[in-house]
Image (cartoon, helix red, strand yellow):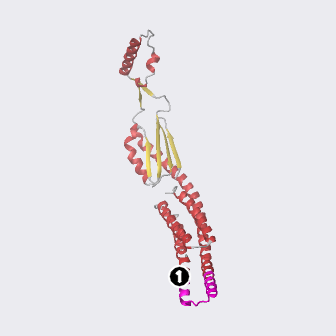
């Protein structure tokens, strides 16, 4: 599920800013950009996130500013300065350049400076961790809000499917009776025109078999059972996204069987509409953990 969380803290000696970003993904993937002083804390960060989030690509950005009262403390590197001076002198001689070497020529090389961190950053991990947990809580709050919107949309669609299943159940009974009456009428007309006798028991048996092939009562019952189970699991926090996705597949399977067994245009239309709703639900479920 998509989301964004941030938190920060500033003191006289250090400024902490942390951002967490989440985008949709089938599995949990965590990438972090940390100051070198906290490189050994990466696993702890991942484990903390893993306890709260099960799916999604999570990016953690931790930035630390030095003292807010002074500029960064830079230290000259004499050896690097001498090495670059010799390098420039060699280039000047090889190219036959008579221009003097100036300070700005050497200042272009950033390696002549070394940034000194304001104290030992590792000592501030307790503060950084508190800010990180605040940013994680902020992310979870945003994900929860989005989840409620998705839940409302999904439930409207699943309720629409449930209503259509109810209408299909009624249409199915009517469809079986109409089909049976039409076949009986055709057979009677055929018998009358050909002036032949027919085994009525055999005819009744064939009509029963045709009725069984057209009957989709079992499929409707199973589909409605899956719909009810879907409703009961929407608010289940444990792997609800994967479980609901499985139920959508099962509902779709029953609907496809209804379409193949029924010869009713009305039922076929409802099947198309339900499949459209299921496809929308399936898309939404990709965003849910």
Asked whether the viewer can see residue 159, the reply is no
Tell me where the magenta segment starts and ends, as one range: 182-209
Q: Position of residue 136 (x, y in %)?
A: 48, 49
Residue drawn 52% across the image and 45% down it: 6
Q: Position of residue 211 (x, y in %)?
A: 56, 80
Outermost residue to the top: 98
Is 192 placed left or right of 249 in the picture?
right
Q: Which residue is mark 1?
A: 209
Is 83 placed left or right of 148 in the picture?
left
Q: Main secondary structure of the magenta part?
A: helix
How many numbered discs sit on the rendered protein? 1
Outermost residue to the front: 194
From the viewer's side, name the closer residue of 152 and 65. 152
- Residue 124 picture quarter: top left
Q: Position of residue 265 (x, y in %)?
A: 63, 70
For numbered disc 1, what is the local secondary structure?
helix
Asked whether the viewer can see residue 21, the reply is yes
User: In the image, is residue 99 above or below residue 22?
Assistant: above
Residue drawn 44% across the image and 52% down it: 28
Task: For label 1, count other residues whose C-alpha is less than 10 Å away and answer few (under 14), some (14-19) or many (20+).
Answer: few
From the viewer's side, name the closer residue of 93 and 186. 186
- Residue 82 picture quarter: top left
Q: Position of residue 280 (x, y in %)?
A: 57, 59
User: In the image, is residue 272 above or below residue 23?
Assistant: below
From the viewer's side, name the closer residue of 71 and 195. 195
């Amino acid at each position: 599920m998509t989301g964004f969380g941030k938190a920060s803290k500033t003191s006289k000696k250090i400024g902490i800013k942390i951002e967490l970003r989440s985008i949709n993904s089938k599995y949990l993937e965590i990438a972090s950009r940390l100051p070198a002083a906290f490189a050994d804390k990466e696993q702890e960060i991942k484990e903390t996130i893993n306890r709260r989030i099960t799916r999604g690509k999570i990016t953690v950005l931790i930035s630390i500013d030095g003292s807010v009262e002074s500029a960064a403390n830079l230290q000259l590197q004499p050896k690097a300065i001498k090495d670059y001076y010799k390098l420039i002198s060699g280039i000047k001689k090889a190219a036959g350049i008579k221009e003097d070497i100036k300070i700005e020529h050497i200042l272009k090389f950033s390696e002549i400076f070394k940034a000194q961190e304001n104290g030992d950053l590792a000592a501030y991990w307790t503060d950084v961790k508190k800010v990180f947990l605040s940013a994680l809580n902020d992310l979870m709050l945003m994900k929860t809000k989005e989840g409620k919107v998705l839940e409302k949309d999904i439930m409207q669609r699943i309720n629409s499917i449930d209503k259509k299943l109810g209408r299909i159940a009624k249409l199915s009974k009517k469809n079986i009776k109409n089909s049976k009456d039409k076949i009986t009428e055709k057979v009677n007309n055929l018998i009358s025109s050909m002036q032949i006798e027919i085994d009525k028991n055999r005819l009744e048996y064939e009509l029963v078999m045709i009725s069984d092939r057209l009957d989709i009562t079992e499929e409707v019952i199973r589909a409605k059972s899956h719909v009810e189970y879907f409703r009961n699991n929407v608010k289940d926090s444990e792997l609800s996204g994967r479980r609901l996705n499985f139920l959508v597949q099962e509902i779709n399977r029953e609907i496809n069987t209804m379409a193949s067994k029924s010869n009713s245009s009305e039922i076929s239309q409802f099947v198309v509409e339900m499949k459209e709703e299921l496809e929308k639900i399936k898309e939404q479920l990709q965003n849910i953990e």
